[in-house]
Amino acid sequence: MNKLDIQTLYKFNHWANMRILIAVSKLTTEQFLAGAVFPHRELRSTLTHALLAEWIWRTRWQGETPAARFKPEDFPNLDALRTRWLEEEKKLDTFINSLNDESVNATFQYKTKDGEIRENVLWHAMIHVVNHGTQHRSEAAAILTELGHSPGDLDLMLFLNEQT
């Protein structure tokens, strides 16, 4: 794996996240907070979980152990969530731009929430985050579609075709 591949995947991740957030912006606050049948119970919780994963992994990659976690209640509305997500995306971009091919293929250690020390190859963990986001964007897209505001296709190939 190389830095350019990781940059491309994270540009896709940002593009797909923004498509979801644009669709969410068409909802009322009540719809944003309404219960759903998915594992995280509501759209706000689903999106908070996806953002939390991006933040936790980035901080781990930078050698930190996050002590606190985001909660859905930290984001009373879409504007609060979107603002925090855009901040995180800037930090992710800065981190990704600091990498080189060697660092992408190196291992890193981190501590889990249970205090276990783990070691992974950086690009494995980075792809995990994009894949994890895909799962939760799919859940969010299903909720949005049910509410009449589909985000449209979120495919990697669509993103790549739009780049040319």
Image (cartoon, rainbow, N blue to C red):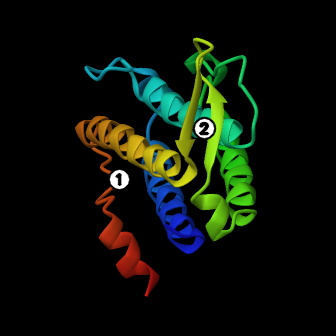
Mark 2: which secondary structure? helix
The residue lying furthest to the top in this view is 114
Which picture quadrant has residue 161? bottom left
Residue 11 screen position, x and y as percent:
54, 65
Task: Return the residue nearer the eye: 141 or 121.
Answer: 121
Question: Three-letter amino acid code at disc 2?
Answer: Trp
Left or right: 91 with respect to 44?
A: right
Crowdedness near tag 1: few (<14), some (14–19) or many (≥20) residues, C-alpha within 10 Å? many
- For the C terminus, the image quarter is bottom left
Residue at numbered disc 1: 151
Q: Is residue 32 left or right of residue 93?
A: left
* Residue 106 picture quarter: bottom right
Label 1: state its secondary structure. loop
Residue 79 seen in render? no
- Per the model, the C-alpha gap separating discs 1 and 2 is 26 Å
Q: Amino acid at mark 1?
A: Pro
Residue sitting at x 56%, y 20%:
72
Residue 153 visible to the viewer: yes
Task: Find residue 60 and report its horizontal and vertical position in percent.
Answer: 67, 36
Residue in the image at 45% along x and 52% along y: 127
Q: Residues within 10 Å of mark 2 (few under 14, many from 20)?
A: many
Left or right, residue 120 beside residue 160: right
x, y percent for residue 28: 46, 33
133 and 19: which one is in front? 133
- What x and y, as percent, mark residue 99? 70, 63
- Mark seen at residue 57: 2
Disc assigned to residue 125: none
Based on the displayed image, in which of its 4 quarters is residue 74 positioned? top right
Query: From the viewer's perspective, is 70 left or right of 43?
Result: right
Q: Which residue is at 44% across, 56% downward? A: 16
* Comes first in the chain, label 1 or label 2: 2
